[in-house]
Image (cartoon, grey):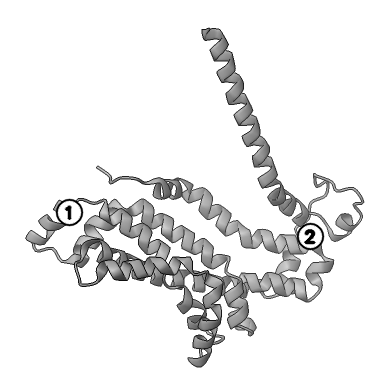
Amino acid sequence: MKPKDGKTFSFGRAAVYLLLVLWGVIVLFPFYWMVLSSFKSYSSYNAEFVPRFIVTDPTLANYRDAFTAVPLARYFLNTLIFTAATTAIMLTVTVLAAFAFSRLEFRGKNAVFALFLSLMMIPGELVVITNFVTITDWNMRNTFWGLILPSVTSVFYIYLLKENFEQIPDELYKAAKIDGTSDLKYLLKVMLPICRPTVVTVTILKVIECWNSYVWPRLITDEQAYFLVSNGIQEIRENGFGRENIPAMMAAVVVISLPLVILFLVFRGKIMSGVMRGGTKG
């Protein structure tokens, strides 16, 4: 019986790994094809009647063309400014709100938090028109503040941090208050270090969200001086260059995607730890 069970178990594990490898190939193949195409010359790419899965004569000319077709470097700088400012403001608002809902006592706290949670059921697309009218009335179109303000809070992130903050024993908070520690100092010195994996996860997810923003930047900006990388990709496609020169288009997409790939690879452990964190440290 034991050898039979062992063989069955080994076959089951082999089947699982085979399916995982197959699924990994399916998921990663578009990225491989994107990178592969970015190193093919324009002539060789158009001459392929049957797609080739290797590059015999790689070239970097497509990356040069991607940066010269549109001011992609300027769009990168704009995206960095937008991402850094939005993430910093969002973290400040989210952390303070989560702390208030998890530790402070005030009238109507549960009702207000329930109202906050109800907002999660409203699709973000429904508030785009309201945000557009508001930003336009405030004369913030084609400004960084017009890009940033609609994204400086997140009900989901407030809920996620609140649940993590509530896992910290109340005795720590009461002991800190007896020692004369202020709420802000307790938040910075005790709660944030304990919940660091979740805070890092929220930060990375917000960075990815800002970097991939497309609808709102396209709607609120029509001047090149405030275009983000998503606008740059669309501009390359709309001016005809990207439609004709697919390798250069792929090179631009690779350049734009690379920072997020590196970010995920560096912090993948923190992301998994923050998402699956079910208890307090110590």
Residue under the image location 43 percent in, 60 percent down: 203
On screen, residue 103 above or below 17:
below
Q: CA distance from mark 1 to mark 2?
A: 58 Å
Rendering quarter of residue 112: bottom left
Considering the numbered disc 1 on the image, is that residue within a helix, a strand or a loop?
A: helix
Rendering quarter of residue 104: bottom left
Seen from the viewer's position, the closer of residues 164 and 43 is: 164
The answer to whether the residue labelled 1 contacts the one labelled 2, judged by CB atoms less than 8 Å apart, is no
User: Residue 185 vs residue 149: left or right?
Assistant: left
Where residue 204 appears, x then y in whole percent?
46, 58
Q: Is residue 23 visible?
A: yes
**Residue type beneath disc 1:** Asp
Mark 2 = which residue?
247
Considering the numbered disc 2 on the image, is that residue within a helix, a strand or a loop?
A: helix
Seen from the viewer's position, the closer of residues 247 and 169 is: 169
On screen, residue 196 above or below 86:
above
On screen, residue 181 above or below 17:
below
N-terminal of the two: label 1 or label 2? 1
On screen, residue 208 above or below 215:
above
Q: Quadrant of the C terminus?
A: top left
Residue under the image location 47 percent in, 50 percent down: 267
Where residue 164 appears, x then y in whole percent?
31, 54
Where residue 150 appears, x then y in whole percent?
47, 77
**Residue type beneath disc 2:** Pro
Rendering quarter of residue 88: bottom left
Mark 1 = which residue?
170
Residue under the image location 20 percent in, 61 percent down: 186
